[in-house]
Amino acid sequence: MSTPEPGYKSSTGTGGVKNHVVIDVVLRVVLFATSLVALIVMVTSKQTKLVPVAPGMAISMVANFDQTPAFIYFIVAMSVACLYSIITGALSILALLKLKQGSMKLVFHFVILDTLLLGVLASATGAAGGVAYIGYKGNSHSRWNKVCNVFDSFCGHVLGSLAVSLLPSIALLLLVWLSVFMFSKKIRLN
Amino acid sequence: MSTPEPGYKSSTGTGGVKNHVVIDVVLRVVLFATSLVALIVMVTSKQTKLVPVAPGMAISMVANFDQTPAFIYFIVAMSVACLYSIITGALSILALLKLKQGSMKLVFHFVILDTLLLGVLASATGAAGGVAYIGYKGNSHSRWNKVCNVFDSFCGHVLGSLAVSLLPSIALLLLVWLSVFMFSKKIRLN
């Protein structure tokens, strides 16, 4: 039906392209798994605590991610990354099964979207990280007290989620690098 | 000395590559100018104000970017972007003057570093934005009062710097897209 793209069968052969697509799929699985974990850990961060306000008197206080816009942005970005990794992962697996002519076109579309999502994810991680740092350390200059000494479990969830959330960004960075590497190899092949 | 790279003289010819390099240089100038403006506006944000604490008594309070780690990270990231844009801009101009064989190799190295810097800049803008939002709106749940009603000039600088700081990230995103576009065009040419 379609003629094989020039360069596929030369020095590296189909095996070279296949290896690239396998790494692509693996990285998309990592992207999916890590963004899902970061998402779940952040969503389940809710903590209710009795905070003493006077001798013999305490009020029930709730800490949840939806009280902070930066954490909501973080959740949205991670959800998008999750969904995106499922769609692109499926397309990558299809490309792996067929190794059809359009695969370089697919790589082109992938790298465009990967880069955009990298920017979104990095900014979301940054925003959540910036706010979490204040929650953890406080800021005496603006009189923002730390909240992690009170809401320890909530903070544990947020910090855990943030630590994991670095991985989707790294996976996306590696995906972009991989695509660029595929392009450069293709140019040298011809 | 060196043979011209295959594909340069075909359908789009040297003119096509030249146009790409010109856009590349323009985007790097935009990257330099906007990151420098964001840097200067943030660095000059210092504000000293007399805050009344009791009737007839006021204390002098200072707001400065170096009181918030997120803003320091922002400054460092913008400085790196500034320096990076000077170096890569100069290399791009050299490539424009020579249009030598190595220019595609240069594009390869550029896109690798551009993507990395995009991640760093986006996270820095996110971190500073997350903290600035609290300063602007406060957060009643964690009892963090807004500071922008007191330090209006400081907040004006921070918000201005943040608004401008979106442009370097957009410029880097476009630079990566441009490089990928160059690669894809090159593959189709051969």
Image (cartoon, coloured by chain):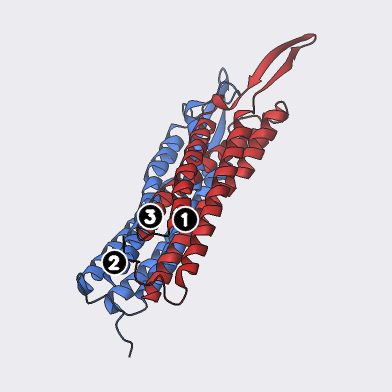
Chain colours: A blue, B red
Mark 2: which amino acid? Answer: Arg
Q: Which residue is mark 1?
A: B97
Q: Position of residue A57 (x, y in %)?
A: 57, 23
Residue that carries the numbered disc 3 in the rendered image: B106
In terms of sequence position, does the residue under pointer 3 or pointer 1 come before the other?
1
Task: Using the image, determine if residue B93 lies above or below residue A15.
Answer: above
Residue positioned 59% across, 29% down in the render: B43
Q: Quadrant of the N terminus of chain B?
A: bottom left
Closer to us: B116 or A32: B116
What secondary structure is found at the residue carrying circle 2? helix
Q: Name the image quarter holding residue A82.
A: bottom left
Q: Seen from this angle, which residue lies furthest bottom?
A: A1
Considering depth in this image, is B74 or A49 the residue closer to the camera? Answer: B74
Q: Chain for mark 1? A: B
Specify the subunit that label 3 lies on.
B
Q: Residue at x 61, y 30 (%)?
A: B144
Q: What separation in Å lies between label 3 and label 2 (alpha carbons)? A: 14 Å
Count residues near mark 1 (Cα–Cα under 10 Å), then give few for <14, some for 14-19, many for 20+: few
Please state which amino acid type lies under the numbered disc 1: Leu
Tell me how far mark 1 sits from mark 2, CA to CA. 23 Å
Q: Is residue A68 above or below residue A117?
A: above
Q: Amino acid at mark 3?
A: Leu
**Residue furthest toward the right?**
B56
Distance Cα–Cα, label 3 vs label 1: 14 Å
Q: Which circle, 3 or 1, is nearer the viewer?
A: 1
In which quadrant is the C terminus of chain B drawn? bottom left
Q: Which residue is mark 2?
A: A188
